[in-house]
Amino acid sequence: MLNAVNLSHEALDPSAPVPSCKGRGWLSDELSQNQWTVSLMAAGQAEVARMIKVMQIHPLPTILRHPDQFEIPHLRAAFQQMKAICEKGIGFAVLDRLPIDSFDIEDIVSVYWTLGHLMGRNVAQKWDGTMIYDVTDTGQKYGYGVRGSATNVELGFHTDNAFGMQVPDFVGLLCKYPAATGGLSRFCSLYTVHERMEAKYPEALQRLYQPMLFDRQAEHSPSDPKVCWAPFFSWRGEKLRCRANTSLVRKGYAVAEQKMDKELVDALTAIDEVSAAEELWVEAPLERGQVQYLNNHELGHYRSDFHDAQDPEKKRHLYRLWHRELGAITYDG
């Protein structure tokens, strides 16, 4: 066996029946903005202001903050609604919005971190233990060891941390500033993608249930394998689980200096084609102060390339959180 982190236990037993995806997905023309938007009413805005006042009177490091330290019934209700949309609804939700122009950004980020616990445990997003991840163009070139989130390149259909030992359940983004142009967010239902693969490319779909190599993006101990071995699709009970990122699969084989089998080449080409269909995607541009959450198992997302504002203080900058219930809060879990 190639030197790889082996996650093949997620692969489906060939004799086990695959739950049906029929009727569980959606197409873009079936959705409207009110299905994903959660408005932060005046009472919630007032709770944010009180949270910040308490934080200023009783300082603590942000990562020690928790919702139980505050009386925030309206904010709790808003996040319960967000989580319900992500778990049982269309899979992504947008909170409109935190009062980002009224407070220092550090205070708003502390509020965002604290409220994030209402979606699930906040967990590390890098092997070095980074808990709040800055999504911004660092000027680095996208390649081995440099995540696409640190660049301004187009990021195709994917789920976050597809190569991780434990994949986050939910991904959150707080927008400090959007891009001057581009940087658009698009979402698609993986149930719909799966259903179309089953109808058009059933043999390719079967290959996506078998393990393959993923590039681990250098997010591991220097002595650990550079790739992992895991299936693209799997199930947990009646819930679909997807490690979606065809780019990192292709890079995984390049890093490992291994040749992909023809079945996998064809399967990656097929799912790229299916997931590119415009009627599968809905756009939800993220604006300053808005908070976006998505179900990272059942929803694929995409980001277009972008250009920043000339003022470096207003370049595209999002703050990302990951939430996961299984495993430890460390990156590998």
Image (cartoon, rainbow, N blue to C red):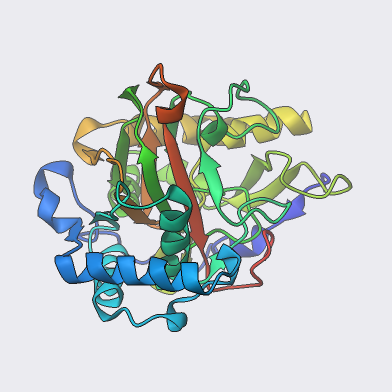
Question: Which residue is rendered at x = 31% and y = 48% of the image?
Answer: 289
Q: Nearer the viewer, residue 97 or 124?
A: 97
Question: Which residue is rendered at x = 62% and y = 48% of the image?
Answer: 163
Toward the right, the furthest residue is 223
Question: Which residue is rendered at x = 83% and y = 46% of the image?
Answer: 3
Question: In the rendered view, does 323 fall on the left or right side of 316?
Answer: right
In percent of width and height, residue 21 lies at 29, 59
Toward the top, the furthest residue is 310
Question: In the rendered view, does 221 fall on the left or right side of 165?
Answer: right
Toward the front, the furthest residue is 57
Residue 296 visible at all:
no
In percent of width and height, residue 170 lies at 43, 60
In percent of width and height, residue 200 lies at 31, 39
Question: Is 189 rendered above or below residue 15?
Answer: above
Residue 289 visible at all:
yes
Count the numbered circles shown. Answer: 0
Q: Nearer the viewer, residue 231 or 251?
A: 251
The quarter in which the C terminus is drawn is bottom right
Question: Is 324 rendered above or below residue 36?
Answer: below
In percent of width and height, residue 33 lies at 13, 49
Q: Nearer the viewer, residue 304 or 306?
A: 306
Question: Is 120 rendered above or below residue 69?
Answer: above
Question: In the rendered view, does 74 fall on the left or right side of 292?
Answer: left
Question: Is 231 rendered above or below residue 28?
Answer: below
